[in-house]
Image (spheres, rainbow, N blue to C red):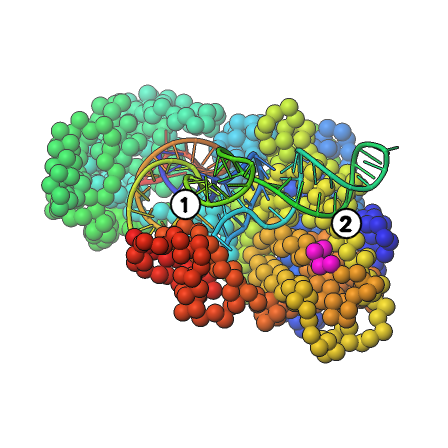
RNA sequence: GCCGGAGUGGCGAAAUUGGUAUACGCACCAGACUCAAAAUCUGGCGAGGUCAAACUCAUGUCGGUUCGAGUCCGACCUCCGGCACCA
């Protein structure tokens, strides 16, 4: 240790020592309880940004804490290394995507190591390597065997700018999630994973994780699955054997149905139109609507105008027997429910708007339940009756004009009417979901090839397991045209059929990269396994993940896919639980001021407000950068970058360091063994007792808070402890044994508890303080002694009528009666209550006294 | 429009869950050291008020519950996120 704090030297030194000692490798045979700390694996773009730094600093603090607490900690990292940027680099600059990716990994790994994140590098994985994606393919084949992977012609979301297919999630809102281009629809043969089979579980199992996941993430997951309870009802088509099935959540309003409305894509439409005089017009309308739906689907925040056309076909309401017209309209979605709805203008806003426009009848069949208070009942009734309805009445209420069902409450009618429909055979209660199957086909080069073969004789044939992996060719022509580049590599395409041995062609699509990231953290448990994705026992030993940390941009896609994948793996017998992640933290964004403005925005190249982690490390040290990031704001809040804030972090580290330096000789060169033990010390002065109290209070406070990841207040507590040490005026050269003891206790606790936030500096001080024999990862988190932490005197506020008027210094053991007497005897209080009647006297032991006077 | 979250000093934020509001840090001011500056150290720092004190007012706004409210309840305002024809 030098007298001065030189982070660069210290950090290099300890990074090397850690590497040599393989200090952070998790051992499968370690009998201690495990803790799995996981950060979302990065895409190897080439450079870490501050968001990464924050993510890893949080994860590392927790990993270190658990290590010091005696847990067997798993803290791995890897690379989500398939994906567009590598392919873009190939298309635009003719660079080999594999080389580009590997080079980026080397650089980013270096950055992580310069940050000193305590990863187990022996478990590092990368999605683009055959050893890894072999198992993507293996899972795909397993799912295919189980009927969970299938191929279908399907209108897919097509990004015209990137020339590729997007998943529903990636095109939500009608725009490409990457480039923002308006998404079009195209028909292509696509592979899908049957995530809809798991829709119910994806909602139901939320109760297993709701205590550990942020509510906002769970909400978005629930919304995405979009579970909706209602009923299917079949409307018979007049003069035909056909039936139109609709889905409704409001079967209780069925007597108010004045039309059936079909989506333009409805499969029955053409058949229904046969013989209709309006056939031509309707078909033209449907075509136009289809292309409009596919094209500029929506201009955001604006609802499309509702357009429709009467088909001239009639349908029969199975409840009332009434005949109502069938329409086609642009506001009915084929993708949801059955693609057909019963239109109830009086009780649905959209149907109301539609009915207004096309002068369809509006028939009220639900009334508000009248209240006891006449005024309210009167109000609502008269308004309702006058029925110049401005809006649909969408609340539940009481049924009217509904035949035998009139007089029932909506809640009751919904159940009874569905049951009735079922008995009569024209419907049933049903649950629908918004979520659709996961389209995983991508017309791209840089991904895991879908392991399928097409044979003219045998049809679609899965690649046999012993032929995995289907290896990506070294390179391909990147046209950027939209056709999979693999189709242009004959050596790849041409193969023989595994069944009949005749020439056959390989599937040329690759898989969505979300496949790679759906199961990667299970691979960390057994990263070099060559015969299985991982050993089940090892996976069950380490997973589920105890704490997962990442940005909330992955709140829907990644996290729903990985939950789905886990459930499939459970059904395959690979893991023994339903949910992969016990606790999830979505960290806040790192923002910086946009130059020339007052706005704080996420750091980005285009805004020019990015901060380079390497420059920060060079200027202030990795420890200071990490400490600042953890101290400046609670982990889930936005973090505003501040150069002076990071300077403050350096200042604090330097002060701790100087303190350790000032005392290290006295603490190490001691002749008396008593100085490390309390035994030889007969008495502690009040000053040493105060220092020890602060030490033990700080330990208790930080230990209580750590699991909740309240790092900002933890760092504040460490600063307070240092301030207390600074105030402890004692010269190391002449300090008495008891003082040396108290200082040692304080400094050692400070250093150990600093480790999660600034591990290099902590290691350096730990060594200097005479613990050169071992790294901090074999040290122990300090124990708080509640006796020592207890205050010797309390300051009790005395209030008069709830206002603070005086304070009393007392011993913690003071009785209620004594407190009461002391408060009344207080000079200030006496003058205040003089001439008043004391109505009440509240004494909260250890806390306060409140005197109520009149 | 619907859903979720949040409003506390000049700024980032604390507050043992109903009990001394503003911990810790940043910025700022003053002092020490220095020829000087930086660094470092010491002190100050919610607003009003005063020589100083007393005192008064302050946790988005207005009400309520309570001996006591940043915290609980009701209404409203603002900001930030998410979703959006899902029948």
Residue A34 can be seen in this image: no
Residue beneath label 1, please?
Answer: A226
Main secondary structure type of the part rendered in magenta:
helix
Asked if residue A728 lies in the magenta stretch, the reply is yes
Whether residue A104 is situated above or below residue A480 in the rendered picture: below
What whole-number distance in Å separates the C-alpha atoms at marks 1 and 2?
54 Å
Q: Residue at x 84, y 70 (%)?
A: A670
Locate residue A415 relative to residue A449 in the image: left or right: left
- Residues rendered magenta in the picture: A725-729
Dot 1, crowdedness within 10 Å: few (<14), some or many (≥20)?
A: some
- Expressed as whole percent of the image width and height from the top left, the position of residue B6 reads 47, 43
Q: Which mark is residue A103?
A: none
Whether residue A29 is situated above or below residue A591 in the rendered picture: below
Q: Residue at x 41, y 45 (%)?
A: A226
For mark 2, name the chain. Answer: A
Which of these two is toward me, A89 or A23? A23
Q: Quadrant of the N terminus of chain A?
A: bottom right
Which of these two is toward me, A187 or A626? A626
Residue beneath label 2, please?
Answer: A654
Helix, strand, or loop for circle 2?
helix
């Amino acid at each position: 240790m030098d007298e001065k704090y030189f982070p660069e030297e210290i950090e290099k030194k300890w990074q090397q020592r850690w590497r040599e000692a393989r200090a952070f490798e998790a051992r499968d045979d370690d009998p201690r309880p495990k803790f799995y700390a996981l950060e979302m694996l990065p895409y190897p773009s080439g450079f870490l940004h501050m968001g990464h730094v924050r993510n890893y600093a949080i994860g590392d603090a927790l990993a270190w804490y658990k290590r010091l607490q005696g847990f067997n900690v798993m803290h791995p990292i890897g690379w989500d290394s398939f994906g567009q940027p590598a392919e873009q680099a190939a298309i635009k600059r003719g660079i080999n995507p594999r080389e580009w990716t590997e080079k980026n990994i080397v650089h980013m790994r270096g950055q992580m190591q310069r940050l000193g994140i305590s990863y187990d590098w022996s478990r590092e994985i990368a999605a683009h390597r055959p050893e890894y994606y072999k198992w993507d393919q293996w899972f795909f084949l397993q799912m295919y065997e189980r009927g969970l992977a299938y191929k279908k012609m399907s209108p897919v979301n097509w990004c015209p700018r990137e020339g590729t297919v997007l998943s529903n999630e990636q095109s939500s809102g009608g725009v490409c999630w990457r480039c923002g281009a308006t998404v079009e629809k195209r028909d292509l043969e696509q592979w899908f994973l049957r995530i809809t089979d798991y829709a119910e579980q994806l909602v139901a199992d939320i109760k297993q994780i709701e205590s550990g996941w942020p509510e906002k993430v769970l909400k978005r997951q629930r919304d995405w699955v979009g579970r909706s309870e209602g009923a299917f009802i079949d409307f018979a088509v007049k003069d035909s054997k056909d039936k139109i099935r609709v889905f409704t959540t409001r079967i209780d309003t069925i007597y108010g149905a004045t039309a059936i409305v079909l989506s333009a894509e409805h499969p029955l439409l053409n058949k229904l139109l046969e013989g209709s005089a309006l056939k031509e017009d309707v078909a033209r309308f449907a075509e136009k609507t289809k292309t409009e739906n596919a094209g500029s689907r929506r201009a955001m925040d604006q609802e499309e105008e509702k357009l429709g056309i009467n088909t001239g076909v009639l349908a029969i309401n199975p409840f009332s027997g009434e005949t109502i017209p069938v329409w086609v309209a642009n506001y009915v979605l084929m993708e949801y429910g059955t693609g057909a709805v019963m239109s109830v203008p009086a009780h649905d806003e959209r149907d109301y708007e539609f009915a207004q426009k096309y002068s369809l009848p509006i028939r009220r069949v639900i009334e508000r339940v009248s209240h006891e208070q006449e005024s309210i009942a009167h109000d609502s009734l008269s308004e309702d009756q006058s029925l110049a309805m401005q809006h649909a009445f969408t609340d539940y209420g009481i049924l009217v004009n509904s035949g035998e069902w009139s007089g029932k409450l909506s809640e009751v009618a919904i159940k009874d009417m569905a049951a009735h429909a079922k008995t009569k055979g024209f419907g049933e209660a049903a649950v629908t979901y918004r979520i659709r199957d996961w389209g995983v086909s991508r017309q791209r080069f840089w991904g895991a090839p879908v392991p399928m073969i097409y044979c003219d004789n045998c049809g679609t044939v899965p690649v046999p397991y012993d032929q995995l992996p289907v290896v990506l060719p070294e390179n391909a022509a990147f046209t950027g045209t939209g056709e999979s580049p693999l189709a242009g590599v004959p050596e790849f395409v041409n193969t023989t059929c595994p069944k009949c041995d005749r020439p056959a062609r390989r599937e040329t699509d690759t898989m969505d990269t979300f496949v790679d990231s759906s199961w990667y953290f299970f691979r960390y448990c057994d990263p070099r396994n060559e015969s299985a994705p991982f050993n089940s026992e090892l996976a069950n030993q380490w997973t589920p993940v105890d704490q997962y940390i990442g940005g909330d941009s992955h709140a829907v896609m990644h996290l729903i896919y990985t939950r789905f994948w886990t459930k499939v793996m459970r059904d395959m017998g690979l893991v023994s639980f339903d949910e992969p992640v016990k606790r999830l933290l979505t960290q806040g964004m790192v923002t910086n001021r946009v130059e020339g403005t007052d706005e704080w925005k996420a750091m980005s190249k285009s805004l020019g407000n990015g901060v380079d982690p390497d420059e920060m490390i060079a200027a202030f040290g990795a420890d200071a950068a990490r400490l600042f990031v953890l101290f400046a704001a609670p982990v889930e809040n936005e973090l505003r970058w501040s150069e002076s804030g990071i300077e403050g972090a350096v200042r604090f580290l330097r002060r701790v360091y100087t303190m350790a330096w000032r005392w290290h000789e006295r603490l190490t060169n001691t002749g008396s063994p008593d100085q490390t033990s309390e035994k030889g010390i007969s008495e502690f002065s009040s000053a040493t007792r105060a220092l020890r109290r602060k030490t033990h209070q700080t330990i208790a406070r930080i230990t209580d808070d750590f699991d909740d990841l309240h790092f900002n207040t933890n760092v504040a507590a460490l600063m307070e402890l240092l301030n207390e040490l600074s105030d402890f005026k004692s010269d190391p050269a002449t300090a008495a044994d008891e003082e040396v003891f108290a200082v040692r206790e304080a400094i050692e606790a400070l250093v150990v508890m600093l480790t999660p936030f600034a591990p290099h500096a902590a290691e350096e001080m730990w060594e200097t303080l005479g613990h050169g024999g071992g790294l901090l990862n074999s040290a122990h988190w300090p124990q708080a002694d509640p006796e020592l932490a207890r205050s010797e005197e309390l300051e009790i506020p005395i209030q008069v009528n709830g206002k603070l008027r005086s304070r009393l210094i007392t011993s913690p053991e003071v009785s209620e009666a004594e407190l009461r007497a002391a408060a009344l005897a207080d000079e200030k209080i006496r003058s205040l209550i003089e001439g008043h009647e004391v109505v009440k006297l509240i004494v909260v032991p250890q806390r306060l006294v409140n005197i109520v006077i009149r």
